[in-house]
Amino acid sequence: MTTDISGFAAPIITSKCKVPDDWIDYNGHMNVSYYSMAFDQAIDEVFETVLEIGESHTAKTRHGPYVLQNNMHYLDELLVGAEFRVNFRLIDHDAKRMHLFLEMINTSGVVVALSEQLLMNVDLTTRRSTPYPEWVQGRLAQLQTAHDVLPLPPQLGAALGIRRKG
């Protein structure tokens, strides 16, 4: 339970995914709801296999992540059968929260979507926020150190609105 993750890549690259037929909308590309689901599945993969705070941990401890805020950027299309991966990056954390930045990248290396998320650890019995155990906080600190070497993404904290010329 105290695996050293300091040697992990920055960012963490998730498993390859493929866009199934039923993720395609009437515009002929992946529907926005499935981008959200794909990012969620990427987070689940990292939480389960790297941080060990995923579904298995939640089943044992009754503590799990809640998304408090999510900001998405759609930059390019994904069509049926397209393959992609997600780059997972920890921007910041504290005892209860994580600030994540995720990039969805197609097999040509093109970033097709971005997701910036703020998550909080929640005790599922009380439905209230609770600190991560010390061993998780230690892992997050290791991951933070590994990811701090990356330049901050220009889209980080981007405001939403119609930009008008002066």
Image (cartoon, rainbow, N blue to C red):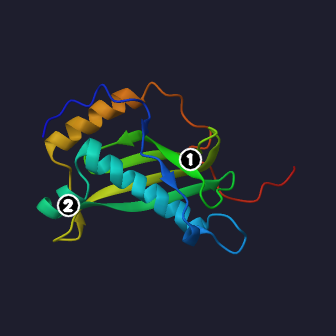
Query: Quick one: 38 or 116, which is closer to the camera?
Result: 38
Q: What label sits on residue 63 in the rendered view? A: none
Instruction: Identify the residue at image location x=38%, y=52%.
Output: 43
Q: Is residue 103 left or right of residue 126?
A: right
Q: How crowded is mark 2: few (under 14 residues within 10 Å), some or many (20 or more)?
A: some
* Residue at the (32%, 56%) spot, across then down: 120
What residue is at 16 percent from the left and 71 percent from the top? 125
Q: Where is residue 80 in the image (x, y as percent from the top left)?
A: 62, 61
Place residue 55 in its image quadrant: bottom left
Q: Mark 1 points at which residue?
A: 157
Identify which residue is drawn at 18% across, 56% down: 57
Q: Point out the residue furthest to the right here.
A: 166
Q: Distance between the residues labelled 1 and 2?
A: 29 Å
- Disc 1 crowd rating (10 Å Cα; few below 14, some 14-19, many 20+) is few
Report the residue marked by disc 2. Answer: 58
- Secondary structure state at the residue bearing disc 2: helix
Among numbered discs 1 and 2, the one appearing first in the sequence? 2
Q: Which amino acid does label 1 sit on?
A: Gly
Do labels 1 and 2 touch, CB within 8 Å? Answer: no
Is any part of residue 100 visible from this angle?
yes
Decide: is 6 above or below 52. Answer: above
Question: Viewer-proximal residue, 22 or 40?
Answer: 22
Does 118 sit left or right of 73 as displayed? left
Inspect the image, locate mark 2, and give the three-letter code of the amino acid beneath it: Thr
Position of residue 119 measured from the top left corner of the image (x, y, whole percent): 37, 55
Could you tell me if residue 102 is visible in this image?
no
Q: Horizontal and vertical percent for residue 18?
A: 52, 55
